[in-house]
Amino acid sequence: MKGLTRSVVWGTGILGAIGLLLYLFVFDVWVVPRGEDAEFAASILPALLPEDKVLVQRGRAPKWGELVRCASPRTPGSYVVGRVFGTPGDRVEVSDHGVFTNGSALSARHGCPQRMVAHPITENLVTMSCAVAETGAWSFEYLTTPAMNAGTHTAIVEAGKVYLVSDNRLMHQDSRDFGQVDASTCEHVVYRLWGERYSDGSRRFQILW
């Protein structure tokens, strides 16, 4: 019995040490802020919601297509969230027709349920179309409208920078608004622990890309 107890204690201690090392050097637990920034809350849909508890991976450069949080170029001490659609040397074009990196765009393989989203400025409800993009390694949902009339934004990504695009293509807070961001400040958002309420099983223990 003593041997079993000793094994359990040792095993628990080892797992705890591994978890601590992962937390200190690999992952960070981040609670997506609620605050009063309605534009930020709308821009992170549909992947994230305010009060989501997520794991972010530290210590490596962000890769194309990943959902990341980066240091805000506008507000010291806060973050911006977007998907990497351009790394150094890439030419990125964002228009009503989609997001093109070096002339290529991801295909929307199939749809997903429409969302009613409150516009952060007018507060009117907007019916948004949902589509699923396939990267070949993973998929993600994004929101758009049939006619955004958002114009065309183009950029060549500078050295040490990344170009971010919000998954909410209409109500965005991304590089169309604040420019390219410092890649060294970006961390991959990899996993949702749970949402605002742990009891909400639809937003618990999910891989995020």
Image: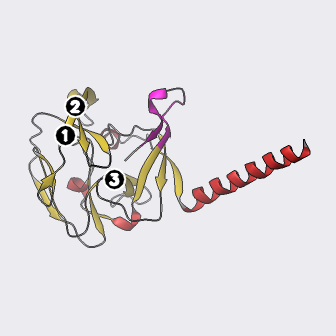
Q: 41 or 29: nearer the eye?
A: 29
Res 195 label = none
Residue at 20 percent of width and 54 percent of height? 176
Q: Quadrant of the N terminus?
A: top right
Q: Where is residue 57 shown, x and y percent of the image?
A: 47, 56
Res 108 label = 1
Q: Where is residue 158 shown, x and y percent of the image?
A: 23, 70
82 relative position to 198: left or right: left
Residue 193 in magenta stretch: yes
Crowd class of label 1 (few under 14; some 14 to 19; many from 20; radius 10 Å): some
Residue 185 in magenta stretch: no
Crowd class of label 3 (few under 14; some 14 to 19; many from 20; radius 10 Å): many
- Amino acid identity at mark 1: Ala
Q: Which residues are magenta?
A: 192-207
Q: Earlier in the sequence, mark 2 or mark 3?
A: 3
- Amino acid identity at mark 2: Gly
Q: Which residue is mark 2?
A: 111
